[in-house]
């Protein structure tokens, strides 16, 4: 969610190492990171800080997994990759090696994927030198959900007929002399 | 009976008396614990004893290097060990505070390690933005290697957040900390 960035970040792991000189903290073993709806699972997470502020989060795994709900009424985005780089300031996600991103049935697989979270823009790049697969970008788009035709509703016997329901439309005007021709046509 | 043999008899009698007294004391003492007897024999009076201690050391340029204060310090020569109460040890770099270590108790060992126990607080850095505060209950500091180790729970507080873990190894020269298990960090936005 847009408010995710205002939430504290919780990280749990088996071990951790803090390099104060370079302001790098490395979390190792069954690492889980949570910030609002953002959730990352990885073997290792490296936190880079600049002037005490979080600048970059790198998750490494086989694969590392990430999920987040971009907006209240939107489906959750699921992302995977052996390397996930998350740039907090730019709200940019870079997935590398065995990269995959999926939302609501739409899925993109390739060697590298860049996902601009705020704009919800996905850029995917293949790698022809890749050993497995053809190294191209694969996209799966689910069939669009067409609106089903309005089914004919047969009024059940106990339903109140429409004519009985007073409508807000003006009552039909009383017939005048000019309409006499209509009257003569009536049987 | 020659004079020499009479002396031997007297020594034997004296030795027998000492052994007898010790045996009687051993069997009549309530807990029969020889340990107490041995310790009682080894402990000697402290070599020195200081109250409201205030100790400063300076580097080759004459700048303040360390400043230590304590409510009380006792030193025993036989074990070359000092026991300090409420120590606060400040170390400086070019007269700027680099690190402050405090605890309820400290034991200064002959191998130049210092065991801090009971409400141990280590503060490094000197501004709110870059300071790191470490809290634990037991910490063994090696003043030669400038490292610190504990198996206890630790809490590390920094401007960016708080980290809790169990077990830690810190190398102050390398400015590197390893947290050994059960790590939970919270970074504030």
Image (spheres, coloured by chain):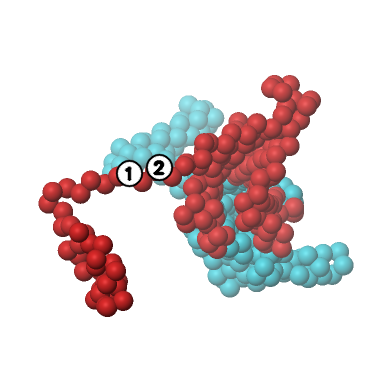
Chain B colour? cyan
| Residue shown at the point (39%, 39%) measured from the top left | B34
Residue B161 sits in which quadrant? bottom right
Q: Which residue is mark 1?
A: A151
- Give the SS element for disc 1: loop
Q: Which mark is residue B78?
A: none
- In the image, the chain rendered in red is A
Which residue occupies the foreground of this view, A42 or A108? A108
**Whole-Å distance between the Cαs marked 2 and 1?**
8 Å
Residue B186 sits in which quadrant? bottom right
Is there one chain holding both mark 2 and mark 1? Answer: yes
Query: Picture coordinates of residue B22 (x, y %)?
Result: 38, 39
Which residue occupies the foreground of this view, B90 or A56? A56
B185 on left or right of A24:
left
A170 on left or right of B159:
left
Q: Which residue is mark 2?
A: A148
């Amino acid at each position: 969610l847009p408010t995710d960035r205002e939430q504290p970040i919780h990280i749990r792991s088996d071990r951790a190492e803090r390099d104060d000189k370079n302001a790098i903290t490395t979390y190792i073993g069954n690492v889980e990171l949570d910030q609002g709806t953002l959730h990352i699972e990885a073997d290792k997470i490296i936190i880079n800080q600049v002037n005490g502020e979080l600048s970059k989060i790198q998750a490494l795994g086989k694969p590392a997994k990430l999920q987040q709900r971009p907006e209240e009424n939107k489906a959750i985005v699921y992302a995977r990759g052996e390397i996930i780089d998350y740039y907090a300031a730019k709200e940019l996600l870079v997935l590398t090696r065995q990269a995959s991103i999926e939302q609501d049935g739409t899925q993109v697989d390739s060697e590298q994927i860049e996902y601009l979270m705020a704009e919800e823009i996905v850029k995917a790049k293949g790698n022809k030198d890749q050993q497995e697969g053809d190294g191209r970008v694969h996209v799966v788009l689910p069939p669009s959900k067409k609106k089903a035709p309005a089914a004919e509703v047969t009024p059940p016997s106990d339903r109140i007929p429409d004519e009985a329901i007073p409508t807000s439309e003006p009552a039909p005007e009383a017939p005048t002399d000019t309409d006499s021709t209509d009257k003569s046509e009536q049987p | 009976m020659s004079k020499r043999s009479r002396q031997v008899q007297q020594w034997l009698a004296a030795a027998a008396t000492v052994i007898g007294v010790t045996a009687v004391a051993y069997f009549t003492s309530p807990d029969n614990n020889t340990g107490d007897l041995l310790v009682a024999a080894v402990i000697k009076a402290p070599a020195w004893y200081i109250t409201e201690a205030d100790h400063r050391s300076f580097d080759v340029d004459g700048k303040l290097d360390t400043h230590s204060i304590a409510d009380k310090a006792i030193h025993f020569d036989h074990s070359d060990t000092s026991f300090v109460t409420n120590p606060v040890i400040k170390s400086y770099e070019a007269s700027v505070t680099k690190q402050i270590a405090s605890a309820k108790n400290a034991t200064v060992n002959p191998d130049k390690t210092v065991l801090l126990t009971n409400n141990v607080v280590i503060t490094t850095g000197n501004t709110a933005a870059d300071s790191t505060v470490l809290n634990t209950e037991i910490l063994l500091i090696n003043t030669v290697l400038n490292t610190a180790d504990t198996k206890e729970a630790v809490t590390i507080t920094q401007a960016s957040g708080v980290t809790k873990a169990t077990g830690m190894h810190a190398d102050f020269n390398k400015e590197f900390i390893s947290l050994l298990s059960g790590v939970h960090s919270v970074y504030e936005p």
